[in-house]
Amino acid sequence: MPSLNTEELEPKVIDPGPSKIIAPGFNYTTVTDKIAGVVLKPIQTTPKQWWISLFLAFCAMQGLLAGAVWLFYKGVGVWGIVIPVAWGFAIVNFVWWIGIGHAGTLISAILLLLKQDWRTSINRFSEAMTLFAVAQAGMFPILHLGRPWLGYWLIPYPNSMWLWPQPRSPLIWDVFAVTTYLTVSLIFWFIGLVPDLATMRDRAKHAWQKFIFGMLGMGWRGSAKHWARYQMAYLLLGGLATPLVVSVHTVVSFDFAISLLPGWHTTIFPPYFVAGAIYSGFAMVVTLAIPARKWFHLEDLITMRHLDCMGKLMIGTGLIVGYGYMMEAFMSWYSGNPHEMFMYMNRATGPYRYFFWSLILCNILIPQSLWSVKVRQNIPRLFIVSIVVNIGMWLERFIIVVTSLARDFLPSSWGMYYPTQWDWAVYVGTLGFFLVLMILFVRTLPSISIFEVREVLHHLAPNVTDDGPAPAPVHGD
Amino acid sequence: MAQFETPEHLLAAANRAYAAGYRNMDAYTPMPIDGLAEAVGFRRNWVAPIVLTCGLCGAAGGFGLLYWISVIAYPHNIAGRPFNSWPAYIPITFECTVLLAALSAVIGMLALNKLPMPYHPVFNVESFSRASIDRFFLCIEASDPKFDLAKTKAFLEQLNPEEVAEVDK
């Protein structure tokens, strides 16, 4: 570890560049102060951009309020869904939001098992993103029910109608997959927070802060025996969440793949959905992390190395998605089935062709720029690519859901889908809701895992000694 | 209770305390330290067996629920397929397994750790608030058979800590 440069502890924050996951000069004390300081500093010092973003996101969130109230009052007819396109924005957005959540679980669980130390600064943040994205996703199937107040009928429970859900239908698998995913994401996130909440309790100045963090932290005191059980539980949660995250989007893709519709009935769907989910999720992490690290001066903890790694994962998963598109085209030709062949031609040249070609542009062509280090390590360019991928993945879900339904087997039963203002209001509303939650989260809870960063510091600079006091790894004060 | 500046120092101290015959002790650190739990005499970690048991219960419960619904409670002939069409039950069985295993990992870990416990005597030591930030503590408990206030204190002093404090009940 390079020797201390005291200037780097001054308010001027320096990104240590693409080779380091943490800037030099941190020790256990300063890293705690830094991360906890974001939460504990007085409200007057909150950056102005934070307030503006919160306000804008809050305004957007009102779209959900208005859209949902009008929907409950009038029924799903206020949306653009028609027969044959009965799955409109609601399902597009459901799949998109669930997919976004996947990167959080991937970062926190799969990279934990792979012992990737660069996950540490971004895992808490992306887990929160998962949780909030899945919460948005979970609303859509309920809103999409004709009678949403009967949504609890999806749960198998003994009832006076003597009716049970149909366990051979992927729609019921979805209920279990999404609720399990939400629950496991929540406990994974919360249990990761507990030791940091104890830190917050000990760092807090005001009694009410101490009380809130103390209660949430459940009296965590860092006992070695507790840590041993904690680490085992955390590792097992990682091991459980890894197949879970793969299963969730697989089950979502079964909603399509198990039907007989051209363009849906294909075996490439599960892996291609999972890859697409991770692709869009990483794009969203990048989109959110870039402003957050800037506002709260966390460039020395969320470094260029993190952004670079996420850029590489985006290009990797993006190529898998590209392979999925190629296989869809190949299989529709190779099947020799006229409906399948027509489906693909219809996507590329039919009424939704602009969406299709924008999708190819956003998801396949533009992200190729991530091969270049000049894009991966250039913040504005990376930010733009991440937004493009988010849009591209949304278009992909739109193309999958709408084109296959709009023109299936019989030309007499074809129909077009046009989203209404209420479709847009609900979609924009969930974007606002999601951003409100994220913006509040980065200000009120430690958005970087403090104890895991301490562990990284410990592993970076171990000082072995048998007896007597040893010098601290790095002196920050 | 003795306070140390580095994890390595605490680990060495814990090993010496164990070698000196102390058994009821605990160490407090701001992050997990490899080997420390073993050094203070932690032997059996029950978290994994609990998770395995609950995971298996989840699998059995999930599959049992679906079997019961489709074969016993609400048999429904769909295109002549068997009532017990088990491949279609795998996704939900899997989800139930993960759900129960994950919940048991968290609840089991908290229960074994006897958390939530907002009050604990160690919090009475003023400098203990740094145990969650940047200091490493070793506490020999009064329930230890070898515990003797003066002797134990002298023992901790010779480990060369930053500070030794008594923990009030």
Image (cartoon, coloured by chain):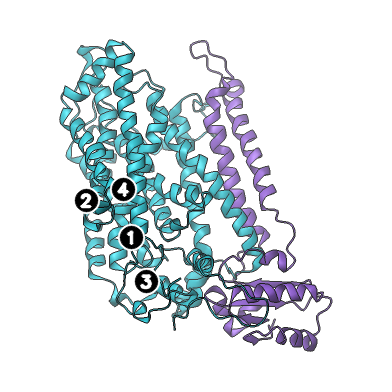
* Residue A91 or residue B43, whichever sits in front: B43
Q: Name the amino acid, label 3.
A: Val
Q: Name the amino acid, label 1.
A: Met
Query: Residue placed at 55% from the left, 79% from the top?
Result: B129
Name the quadrant containing residue B113: bottom right
Determine which residue is flagged by label 2: A384
Looking at marks 3 and 1 on the same chain, the residue that comes earlier in the sequence is marked by 3
Q: Secondary structure at mark 4?
A: helix
Crowdedness near tag 4: few (<14), some (14–19) or many (≥20) residues, C-alpha within 10 Å: many
Looking at marks 2 and 3 on the same chain, the residue that comes earlier in the sequence is marked by 3
Looking at marks 1 and 4 on the same chain, the residue that comes earlier in the sequence is marked by 4
Q: Name the amino acid, label 4.
A: Ala
| Res A211 visible | no
- Vertical arrangement, residue A205 with respect to residue B91, above or below: below
Q: Secondary structure at mark 3?
A: helix
Q: Name the amino acid, label 2.
A: Ile
Crowdedness near tag 2: few (<14), some (14–19) or many (≥20) residues, C-alpha within 10 Å: some
Q: Nearest to the eye among marks 3 and 4: give it.
A: 4
Looking at marks 2 and 1 on the same chain, the residue that comes earlier in the sequence is marked by 1
- Vertical arrangement, residue B121 with respect to residue A80, above or below: below
Residue A38, which numbered label? 3
* Residue A80 or residue A213, whichever sits in front: A213
Chain B's shade in the image? purple
| Res B63 visible | yes
Looking at marks 3 and 4 on the same chain, the residue that comes earlier in the sequence is marked by 3
